[in-house]
Amino acid sequence: MIEIKRLKDCTIEEGVEAWNTGFEGYYFDAATTADKFLSRLVNEGLSPHLSIVAFMDNKPIGIVKNGIREFKGQKLAWNGGTGVALELRKKGIGKMLMEETLSILNEEKVDYASLEAISDNVKAISLYEKMGYEIIDNLEYLGLNGILANNHSDISIGDYKVERAVPMQAGAISFYKGMNPWQTQWQSAKDGEALIVKDANDNPIGYAYYRRTFNSEGKHINTVLFQCEAEPEHKDQEPITRYLINEVFSKFTEDINRVIPNIPIGKSKLTHSILKEMGFTSMTEQVYMMKKL
């Protein structure tokens, strides 16, 4: 007998066990601890009220983490992970979890539900398609480490102004991509930094937001770029995008790790193509799926 509970009605230990059991043998090590589990819920805006845990004989055997954000008056839900115990996969439990999730999202009057799936995970993608999700884009998790010999230090944007800002300000720009995957949205980088390019009339024509990480000695070791976009159809769209990438990564002169999580290959085509040209390589490939509720 399978029982499904809201995460808010479970103990932290049950949530952690459900996650670790559900992601055993996954494509990468997704194991968590109580501290990491709680931290992720808080930092990424995942909701214990919207998330669910499956039990069999009082033992946690599956989980779905869910969150909701609003963009331009619409509610967008995202799936922060769906997992089922290894020995119980292919027994319909994943379908039960997704049906319960969609029921909850409908109760919350969500407009769109989104999720990502590893491109090679054909069975999961098939299940989501049966639940009404459609693939709307392909995603790449990109990385590039070390100092670049060709460090692009000569990139310029002429007389345009560049302002330092916070990611929330980028989220207010008219061409901000609030329907891109949740990991790339400004809320996931709220403790980070932003750059905004403006024209002579003080109109935003480009933005990027990112987070830098420093070690205990204060040395810069890592930068994550969440979004980098120029105004569509702007005559200088490409140089603006190149300039922002170059500035975010300090002209590639530092020996650091550089990461771009889940950039949409279609919806952020120009940014993706420039990053690949600069030497970024794919670490993980996923599909981005969405369902209109």
Image (tube, helix red, strand yellow):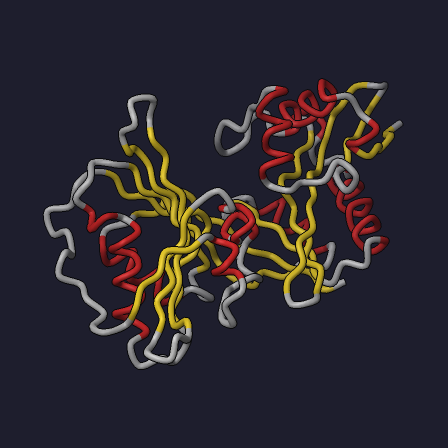
- Which residue is at a point 60% across and 57% down the rendered structure image? 289
Q: Nearer the viewer, residue 58 or 65?
A: 65
- Which residue is at a point 43% across and 56% down the rendered structure image? 227
- Quadrant where the N terminus sits is top right
- Which residue is at a point 46% across and 52% down the rendered structure image? 166
Left or right of residue 252: residue 215: right
Q: Residue 143: x percent and y percent?
A: 33, 43
Q: Nearer the viewer, residue 183 or 236?
A: 236
Q: Which residue appears farthest toward the left when viewing the image?
A: 149
Q: Nearer the viewer, residue 50 or 167?
A: 167
- Which residue is at a point 72% across and 28% down the rendered structure image? 88
- Quadrant where the C terminus sits is bottom right
Left or right of residue 248: residue 123: right
Left or right of residue 250: residue 41: right
- 227 shown above or below 59: below
Q: Residue 219: x percent and y percent?
A: 27, 29
Q: Residue 230: x percent and y percent?
A: 38, 69
